[in-house]
């Protein structure tokens, strides 16, 4: 008995039902893969499944190389449904054994998703010419069985582009820079070395992400010195950060600045360390 059949039996699919599988898969003539990207921010690989929907692989900038897979269905599940993902050989490769990649559950009204490790496995199987295929009972008619396969035809070239894109992703994500606190040396407008590095990351990310709509830059000081002087210093600090962002190519109209002086401290100014926390510029980014 084949590994595919064993996996199907584990789902409660009988041998007679297997012979009546309703199979969705692109043929030799209509199998197409599409690669698209937001350079250094996101890489996307898509594959149409005729009369069913599409398969989508996505990886985004981040500290770790991530991979998400979505089976984007035209008709979403009407009930939670168990499924199994099996790597099958195409018809023109007889004798190559099938094997299970993972089992999963389709959730009601949601597209199908697989864990990161399984998504990478799917890409590896496609690269070697195999067909990752989902098997499950039809949630609208339980007597029917469904198989949804990804074709490896025309996959190689677009996957090469996809891998090159993955190699260029930024090593941090939007979440890593969406709320950034910059610190200053005492009594001046010079950022600490660590904050200079943080600001460079913000500047670089903003250069590539077209979805960023607004950057809010708020300046603050400690309580040493006069209130009016501190207000002016906080405005100068916020303005200098804006100038650096603009010099990096960020449109000026997308950046709003404000100086709050000593009015919103994080904590008391009793020690040099506490005062250093209050001398700051906060950069907030929205999409």
Image (spheres, rainbow, N blue to C red):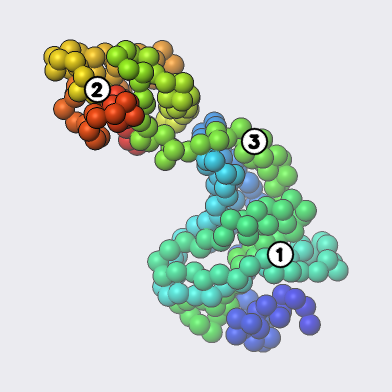
Residue matched to label 3: 167
- For residue 151, say whether it is visible: no
Residue 283 vertical position relative to residue 22 in the rendered view, above or below: above
Q: Mark 3: which secondary structure?
A: helix
Of 195 and 239, the residue lying toward us: 195
- Locate the N terminus and report the quarter of the image it occupies: bottom right
First along the sequence among labels 2 and 3: 3
First along the sequence among labels 3 and 1: 1
Label for residue 150?
Answer: none
Residue 273 image offset from top left, x and y in percent: 34, 29
Q: Residue at x 35, y 35 (%)?
A: 179
State the image quarter where residue 20 is shown.
Answer: bottom right
Q: Residue furthest right?
A: 95
Residue 87 vertical position relative to residue 260 in the rendered view, above or below: below
Q: Residue at x 41, y 13 (%)?
A: 247
Q: Residues within 10 Å of mark 2 (few under 14, many from 20)?
A: many
Q: CA distance from mark 2 to mark 3?
A: 41 Å
Residue 216 vertical position relative to residue 6 in the rendered view, above or below: above
Residue 51 image offset from top left, x and y in percent: 54, 61
Give the left or right position of residue 166, taking residue 255 as reference: right
- For residue 264, say whether it is visible: yes
Residue 88 image offset from top left, x and y in percent: 73, 66
Residue matched to label 1: 87
Give the left or right position of residue 207, taking residue 24 as reference: left
Residue matched to label 2: 221
From the image, state whether disc 1 or disc 2 is nearer to you: 2
First along the sequence among labels 1 and 2: 1
């Amino acid at each position: 008995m084949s590994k595919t059949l064993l996996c199907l039996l584990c789902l409660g699919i009988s041998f007679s039902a297997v012979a009546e599988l309703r199979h969705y898969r692109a043929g030799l003539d209509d199998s197409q893969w599409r690669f698209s990207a937001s350079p250094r921010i996101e890489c996307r690989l898509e594959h149409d499944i005729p009369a069913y929907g599409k398969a989508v692989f996505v990886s985004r900038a981040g500290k770790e190389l991530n991979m998400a897979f979505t089976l984007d269905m035209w008709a979403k599940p009407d009930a939670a449904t168990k499924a199994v993902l099996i790597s099958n050989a195409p018809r023109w490769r007889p004798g190559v054994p099938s094997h299970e990649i993972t089992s999963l559950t389709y959730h009601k009204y949601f597209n199908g998703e697989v864990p990161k490790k399984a998504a990478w496995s799917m890409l590896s199987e496609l690269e070697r010419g195999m067909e990752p295929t989902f098997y499950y009972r039809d949630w609208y008619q339980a007597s029917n069985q469904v198989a949804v396969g990804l074709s490896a035809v025309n996959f190689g070239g677009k996957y090469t582009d996809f891998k090159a894109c993955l190699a260029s992703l930024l090593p941090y994500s939007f979440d890593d820079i969406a709320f950034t606190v910059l610190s200053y040396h005492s009594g001046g407008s010079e950022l600490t070395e660590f904050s200079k590095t943080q600001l460079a990351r913000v500047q670089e990310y903003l250069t590539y992400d077209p979805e960023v709509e607004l950057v809010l830059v708020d300046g603050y000081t400690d309580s040493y010195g006069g209130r009016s002087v501190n207000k002016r210093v906080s405005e100068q600090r916020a303005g200098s950060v804006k100038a650096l962002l603009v010099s990096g190519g960020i449109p000026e109209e997308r950046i709003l600045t404000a100086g709050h002086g000593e009015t919103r401290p994080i904590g008391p100014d009793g020690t040099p360390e506490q005062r250093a926390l209050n001398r700051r510029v906060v950069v907030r980014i929205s999409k």
